[in-house]
Amino acid sequence: MPIASKDPLVVGRVIGDVLDPFDSSIPIRVTYSSRDVCNGCEFKPSQVVHQPRVAIGGDDLRNLYTLVAVNPDAPSPSDPSLREYLHWLVTDIPATTGPSFGNEVVAYESPRPTSGIHRIVFVLFRQLGREKIYAPGWRQNFNTREFSELYNLGMPVAALYFNIQRENGSGGRRLYS
């Protein structure tokens, strides 16, 4: 019998739907107002209207990072035909800082799900150096894996996700063991 993973990125199907397995090596903190994002926690659309504060760990300002935020459940978890919807893309973020010190390639767009419970996934990549990264032509059907390959970003160094549903929705994502 296979051993069930306790990794919240595996349990929440971020590993598989958005990312391949990876080893997290840089701390990342995402905060909306005064509430930290933790894997699998729930937010309402009114709580994520404004772009979050993001703090990236590390100890060398010469290391640069790319931050991607996507929704793999658009337009609905039962029919994710727009998977992955790109909510935010920032490059050239120095270690120990956050996106305000980087280059915002695609402006933050707050999630507004209309049906079902959606995951919003923040993925952090370490860049090999400064590189011109171009905005995709559209936000829908973004592919984090292909983006990483196109710009030679390699595997993620950190990822974090939260669940969100329409403002008057209820309940939470059901996790099966």
Image: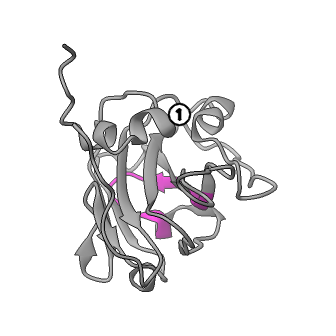
Q: Residues within 10 Å of mark 1 (few under 14, many from 20)?
A: few
Residue 112, by quadrant, is bottom right
Identify which residue, 53 or 57, lies in the foreground.
53
Q: How many marks?
A: 1
Q: Residue at x 68, y 49 (%)?
A: 81
Residue 99 part of the magenta-drawn span: yes
Residue 121 part of the magenta-drawn span: no
On screen, residue 141 versus residue 174, left or right, reads: right
Q: Residue furthest right?
A: 137
Colouring mode (rainbow / by chain / secondary structure / one colour)? one colour
Q: Residue at x 54, y 75 (%)?
A: 110
Point out residue 87 in the picture as x, y percentages from the top left corner: 58, 63
Q: Residue at x 48, y 55 (%)?
A: 93
In the picture shown, does residue 137 fall above or below 26? below
Residue that numbered label 1 is attached to: 128
Q: Mark 1: which secondary structure? A: loop
Q: Residue at x 64, y 41 (%)?
A: 143
Point out residue 172 in the picture as x, y percentages from the top left corner: 31, 64
Point out residue 3 in the picture as x, y percentages from the top left corner: 18, 20
What is the magenta segment's predominant secondary structure? Answer: strand
First to last magenta residue range: 86-100
Going by the numbered disc 1, the residue's amino acid type is: Leu
Point out residue 160 in the picture as x, y percentages from the top left corner: 34, 52
Q: Residue furthest top?
A: 1
Picture quarter with the N terminus: top left
Residue 40, by quadrant, is bottom left
Identify which residue, 167 or 33, lies in the foreground.
167
Picture quarter with the C terminus: top left
